[in-house]
Image (tube, rainbow, N blue to C red):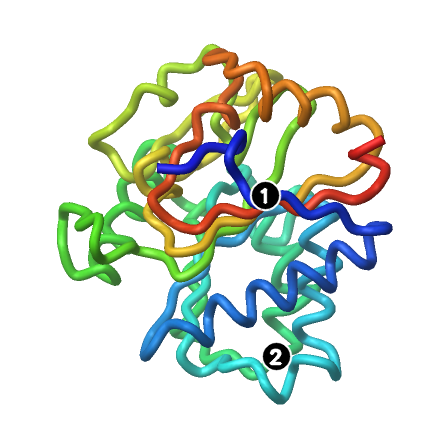
Amino acid sequence: MTTLSGAKLETLADSEALARRAADWLAASVRARDGVAAVALSGGSTPRRLYRLLAGPAYRNTFPWARVHWFWGDERFVPHDDGESNYRMAWEAMLSRAPIPAANIHRVPTEGIGPEAAASAYERELKSFYGADRLDPARPLFAATLLGLGVDGHTASLFPGTSVLDERERWVAAVADPHGKMRITLTYPILESSRNVAFLVEGPEKRMILERVRTSGEDSLPAARFDTFGDLCLFRDAAAAH
């Protein structure tokens, strides 16, 4: 098992270099998987650059789009066309610009349904894709999982002090963020069920929290509790390092 303290750490010159490195990493992770591969996407500004790169000239014609299925590690419980939607961001940056079969895009249901029902529906979709109700450590769900890091130490929508941090049975949960807004998140066992995981961290405001999750072992910081059998990388820009 590998936590962030033991992750393979790479420091890139700036946000653009970080996005290029992450794009290379994601492409390699998917190509290493024979047949159908699943990817768990994250939101935020850093992956937006990555998604645009993947849909651009450098990767558009070489990435194995037809056999990759796209899921989300978490989603804000807002309509799909809302400016806060992780789905909308990924759709505009990559999914609408790349040759991706519609059936390969598995967005979180957030319209015409309540948060708890949405979490249950997404859990059923993940289990249907995986082909089993229980995870097999020898057969990870995802070929690659992208994660970010909040200034409070959260990752996906796993926030400090919330009961979902101790969830080990459910695959997906509805949670309230610190502002009381609802989100849907994959739980630790599902996020950790990945052959390759990368945390993308950029900006000087992340420097202190990144140091804490890597060195302190504080159990109160959700990102510090992440523990995977897969290959774990941490890509940061220079601003998050110095």
Q: Which numbered circle lies on residue 102?
A: none
Between 33 and 179, the one nearer to me in the picture: 33
Q: What residue appears at the point 44 percent right and 24 percent down from the top-left corner?
A: 225
In the picture, residue 148 is in which quadrant? top right
> Which label's residue is closer to the chain start, 2 or 1?
2
Mark 2 is on which residue type? Ala
**From what the image shows, is residue 143 above or below residue 53?**
above
| Residue where numbered disc 2 is placed | 98
Name which residue type carries label 1: Phe
Q: Residue at x 73, y 64 (%)?
A: 20
- Which percent across, then down, holds residue 81? 63, 53
**Percent from the top left, x then y, of residue 160?**
51, 15
Q: Nearer the viewer, residue 97 or 68?
A: 68
The quarter of the rendered structure image containing the C terminus is: top right
Q: How many residues crowd mark 1 within 10 Å: few (<14), some (14–19), many (20+)?
A: many
Instruction: Please tell me whether residue 178 is drawn above or below residue 194 in the rendered image.
Output: above
Q: What is the tally of numbered marks visible in this picture?
A: 2
Residue under numbered circle 1: 199
Circle nearer the viewer, 2 or 1 = 1
Classify the position of the N terminus by image quarter: top left
Badge 2 density bin: few <14, some 14–19, many ≥20, Cα 10 Å: some
Distance Cα–Cα, label 2 vs label 1: 24 Å
Q: Secondary structure at mark 1?
A: strand
Q: Secondary structure at mark 2?
A: loop
